Amino acid sequence: MLMRSIKSGPVAGPVFIAVIAAAFVLAGCGDPANEQGGGGKFKEFTVERGTFRMIVTASGVVKPIDRIEIKSKASGEIVDLPVEQGDEVLKGDLIARLDQKDERAAVAQAQADLDIARAELNQSQRIYDRRNELFDRKLISEEEWNQIELSRTVAKGKLVQATTALDRAQERLSESVVRAPIDGVLLQKYVEKGQIIASGVSNVGGGTPIVDLADMSSVHIEAGIDEIDIGKIAVGQTADVVAEAYPRLHFNGKVVRIAPEARIEQNVTLFDVIVEVENTDGNLKSGMNAAIGITIVEKSDTPLVPAVALMESKDPSGPPDERTVLLKKNGDYVPHRVTIGLSSFRQAEILSGLQEGDVLGVPMTSRLKEENDQMEERIRSSRSFGTGSR
């Protein structure tokens, strides 16, 4: 599973700023280059108000929240199987019906045994009532009377046994009809009509699965987040979800669980994060690939500049949030100190030193390009930007 993340945190050191600047400049960001007196070219960027947002991104897989493997408690041949994979079913809908010949015969036999037991008890009760009067009159012995009491007790026991046997036979008959326990979608179908299946309760191997059923009205996206970013993730944070099958559709999600233990995938330490997404339209299917973007910081209506326009202050004793920019004044680019707030490798918030509409310049030089080429190769093999491999 490929994990991609946009790193948050303070703007990097001078070399990384130069590298990132070169990457943005060479990619054609900003306005067309302007010629400066010395022949150097500059890219121009305008200070604009906007929303500063830090997002950790990752790729994951759509999974049902509750997936149920349905088996039959009874064994036998499937004589009716009216469902297909992908069907939507309601609770109580027929999934499968097994051959009920043996179960119906067992019910009939149990019913007959129950009728006999009732008749025997009635007979024993009548004998008991008649002999009780004789015993009171001392016309029969105590031994004979005890035998009569025993016969009635045995008859009562047989009636209980016959009643229990009938209940079990009727239960087995009902178990030969498999119905949906919940509303949901059939994800998998494992058997066909005419196939003989084993019981899910009496078979040592666990019985034969018939179908997998899941309620897909809400789904989970399970994605691996790099350990560098996992400290920024918390349960309850919102997430934007885009499935590869629907690149123009955005689904709203929420982080509901973070794995307490990491897993290693190709030497990258990942923590599984579960994002729950409402799927009332049923667009998200089990097994789909999806990208998630978890918003960890968001601040609106604040002055923003590209990170490529920022340079470290030359004063080592200066504040850590102080930077230098090349501010355009009267056609020239003049070094100018600014104070930044929230920042990422893409942009930074300006707390002081610039106003909306100010124009900044970023030099384009062969030296920067050379440094960029050298550092790009290092970045490809580095985890500093949260990259991973499948």
Image: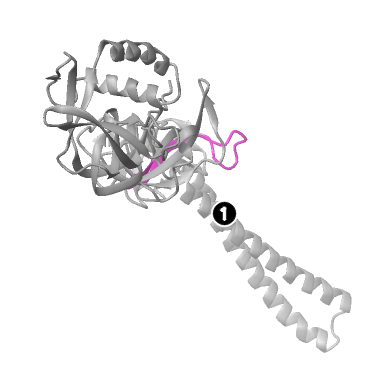
Relative side of 126 to 274, left or right: right
The residue under the point 71% across, 81% down is 129
Placement of the C terminus among the 4 image quadrants: top left
The secondary structure that most of the magenta stretch takes on is loop
- Where does residue 165 sit, x and y in percent of width and height? 60, 56
Rendering quarter of residue 59: top left
Image: magenta residue range: 198-220
Residue 382, position in %: x, y? 45, 20
> Could you tell me which secondary element the residue under label 1 belongs to?
helix
- Residue 244 location (% of width, % of height): 27, 29
Residue identified by numbered label 1: 168
Q: Residues within 10 Å of mark 1 (few under 14, many from 20)?
A: some
Q: For the point 54% across and 39% down, which residue is it? A: 199
Position of 277 with respect to 388 (left or right) is left
Give percent across and percent down for residue 310.
30, 31
Quadrant in the picture for residue 365 = top left
- Vertically, is 254 above or below 261? below
Depth check: give the residue in front, 105 or 84: 84
